Image (cartoon, rainbow, N blue to C red):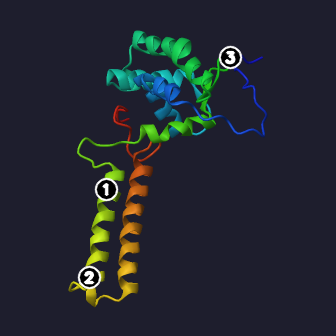
Amino acid sequence: MSTQRSRSRDDDTPPERLSKDTIFSMLSNQRRRHVLYYLDREPGPVSLRDLAERIAAWENDVDVSDLEYKQRKRVYTSLHQTHLPKLDDAGIVAYDRDAGTITLADRAHDLDIYLELVGEHDVPWCDFYLGLSVIVSLFVAAAWLDVFPFSALPDLALAGTVTLLFGVFAAVHAHLARRNHIGGDDAPIDAPDD
């Protein structure tokens, strides 16, 4: 019999969203972020041993084959006793202690937005869209005031240009968000390269 906890909810009931306190608590530890990163990249259940080895290799900046017993054991023990039970209790992973397997749960997707990369020189997207709105408003005002060359544009061309601008930048935003989230092409800031 498995010691995996069963959630007390009906299968038809959608899972509750995680509170921000829970999210920040779960993400406050680098080892738990590594767990989420690894699980998101691996389809299906992952063994605790494989997970511990990969994380130990990242933390010690060595290949899995070069790990020492103590390095493996330290990570294995902390995952088994602390981090995986916390993630399991929050419904972020499903941790089957008896089988020694871990999978991402539905609630893991609640964390994606918090795991997106924002470089130190990046402009927040809300500020970018606000600036774009101001620029487009100036174009529209210039066309309304008959300022050349905007006055020469037909209304449909001006509306099409505005729509195209927002569409292009929204597509770029969507592409970057998909690439930078936990399962994207690039690793999270603190997840080392394989």
Residue at numbered disc 3: 98
Q: Position of residue 186 (x, y in %)?
A: 38, 44
Which circle, 2 or 3, is nearer the viewer?
2
N-term-proximal mark, 2 vs 3: 3
Q: Nearer the viewer, residue 127 or 58?
A: 127
Q: Is residue 122 above or below residue 65?
A: below
Q: Work out whether residue 61 or residue 145 is closer to the camera in this orientation and state it.
A: 145
Marked residue nearer the N-terminal end (3 or 1): 3
Number of numbered labels in the structure image: 3
Judge the density around disc 1: few (<14), some (14-19), many (≥20) Cα neighbours within 10 Å.
few
Which label number is shown at residue 145? 2
Check contact, mark 3 vs mark 1: CB within 8 A. Answer: no
In the displayed structure, 166 sits above or below 158; it is: above
Kindly identify which residue carries mark 1: 128
Looking at the rendered image, the quarter that the C terminus falls into is: top left
> In 3D space, how far apart are the residues under numbered discs 3 and 1 (Cα atoms)?
49 Å
**The N terminus: image quadrant:** top right
